Image (cartoon, rainbow, N blue to C red):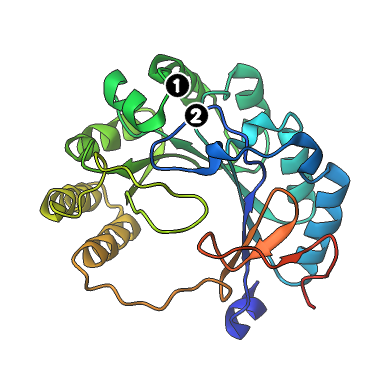
Amino acid sequence: MIKNILLGRPFLVVFNITRRCNSICSMCSIWQTPSKLKDELTFQEMELIFKDLRSFGVKHVFLQGGEPLLRKDIPSIIELLIGLGLNPTLITNGLLLDKKIANKIAELKCNVSISLDSLDPKRYKKIRGVDKLPLLLDNISYCSKIKDKKGVWHITSTISKINYDEVLDLFYYAKNNGFRFNAYPYNYSHCHSSARDEEMSFEEDKILIIDSFEKLGEEAIRNYLIFDKIIYDDIIKYLEGRYCTPCDAIKRSILLTENGDISSCLEFKPSLNLKEIGIKQ
């Protein structure tokens, strides 16, 4: 991985393992074009592809979707990645994170990020498109009680005009349940995964969202979360139009789709398939 960092080559693969999803989020368009099981990579194909990626210096893998837990073989996939010396992070909406799958993943050295955008049922349904907040909170509550989880478990919130006033509630909900907390602003772009939602958009009221991240920054300092404070400060710069760090797509990360296609990121259409051509080529 160090060699890749020095050479400006990707060390992170964002793997959209499926386009199937059990939510219909207003900020996402992936669920509108779900993948078919027959078109998704098989376990054997993943093994060959990730052996190739590992030989190229890739070290980290984000497993996302759609909803990755819709893959019934997700524990085996995580075990495969760990066995290859890779560091997986599972990004899930948490609705399928029941006792059986939660206990299995907790035994593996896999980081987990559970999406939770509101503690209010009506807001949750507006954002996620399904009326399942009680189920999610039950799953999170159970996960919080699992001892000796080998990975780092997070709760991640997308902050928008709908839920900006809940950031501290979400922060302390995560903290009180033993989770790390991540927050990012809702961001619409003309790519293959996002969708524009006027109720979530804060383009005309950026000060509301900026204030929310300033509050998170203050809480980060109070809780000695210095790295989190740096991230919140960068988000504020971005929201204020002052963040001008060059894009790190290709240099640090690449996108791998459910059928093996690769792209520099979600903004661009895939152009090659790793079932047909090696990553070095």
Q: Is residue 106 left or right of residue 218?
A: right
| Residue that appears at 56% across and 76% down | 251
Q: Is residue 134 above or below residue 114?
A: above
Q: Is residue 172 above or below residue 152?
A: above
Examine the image and state in which quarter residue 265 appears.
bottom right
Q: Would you name the residue on which mark 1 appears?
A: 136
Examine the image and state in which quarter residue 260 appears.
bottom right
Q: Is residue 152 left or right of residue 275?
A: left
Report x, y in % for residue 64: 58, 44
Q: Nearer the viewer, mark 1 or mark 2?
A: 2
Report x, y in % for residue 106: 62, 32
Q: Is residue 224 left or right of residue 258?
A: left
Q: Which mark is residue 201?
A: none
Q: Would you name the residue on which mark 2 appears?
A: 23
| Residue that appears at 40% across and 17% down | 131
Mark 1: amino acid: Leu
Mark 2: amino acid: Ser
Report x, y in % for residue 6: 59, 83
| Residue that appears at 59% across and 68% down | 264
Graded by Cα atoms within 10 Å as few (under 14), some (14 to 19) or many (20 or more), the crowding at tag 2 reads some
Q: Locate the N terminus and report the quarter of the image it occupies.
A: bottom right
